[in-house]
């Protein structure tokens, strides 16, 4: 598997904590030197390991925000 490089530009917030110390976080991340995107995934303490996640553009994130506001 190719080496994935990432830089956490900004931590937006932590959604939850697991009993094993991992956290589900929304961050702004640059993947492999590309423009940063919003990223939602689980992280180990110290951000050495990561779980599967999703990346969102700012437009995607704003659309998700609207969907959640309309959600009953």
Image (cartoon, grey):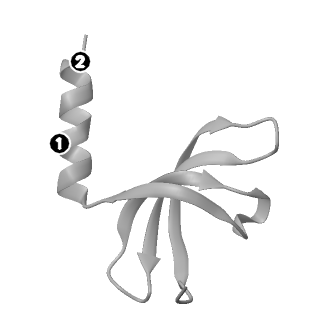
Quadrant occupied by the N terminus: bottom right
Question: Looking at the image, which residue sits at the far right?
Answer: 20
Near-viewer residue (58 or 22): 22
Query: Dots 2 and 1: beta carbons under 8 Å?
Result: no
Residue at left 17%, top 55%?
A: 59
Residue 60's x, y, as percent?
A: 21, 52
Q: Which residue matches tag 1?
A: 63
Residue 17's x, y, as percent?
A: 70, 37
Left or right, 45 with reference to 69: right
Question: Looking at the image, which residue sits at the far front?
Answer: 1
How many dots with numbers? 2
Quadrant occupied by the C terminus: top left
Q: Residues within 10 Å of mark 1 (few under 14, many from 20)?
A: few
Residue 66's x, y, as percent?
A: 18, 32
Q: Is residue 30 above or below residue 10?
A: below
Q: Is residue 16 above or below residue 56?
A: above
Residue at left 82%, top 43%?
A: 20
């Amino acid at each position: 598997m190719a080496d994935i490089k990432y830089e956490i530009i900004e931590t937006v917030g932590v959604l939850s904590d697991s009993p094993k110390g991992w956290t589900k976080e929304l961050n702004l991340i640059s993947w492999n030197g590309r423009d940063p995107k919003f990223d939602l995934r689980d992280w180990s303490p110290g951000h050495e390991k990561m779980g599967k996640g999703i990346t969102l553009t700012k437009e995607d994130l704003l659309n998700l925000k609207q969907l959640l506001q309309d959600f009953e």
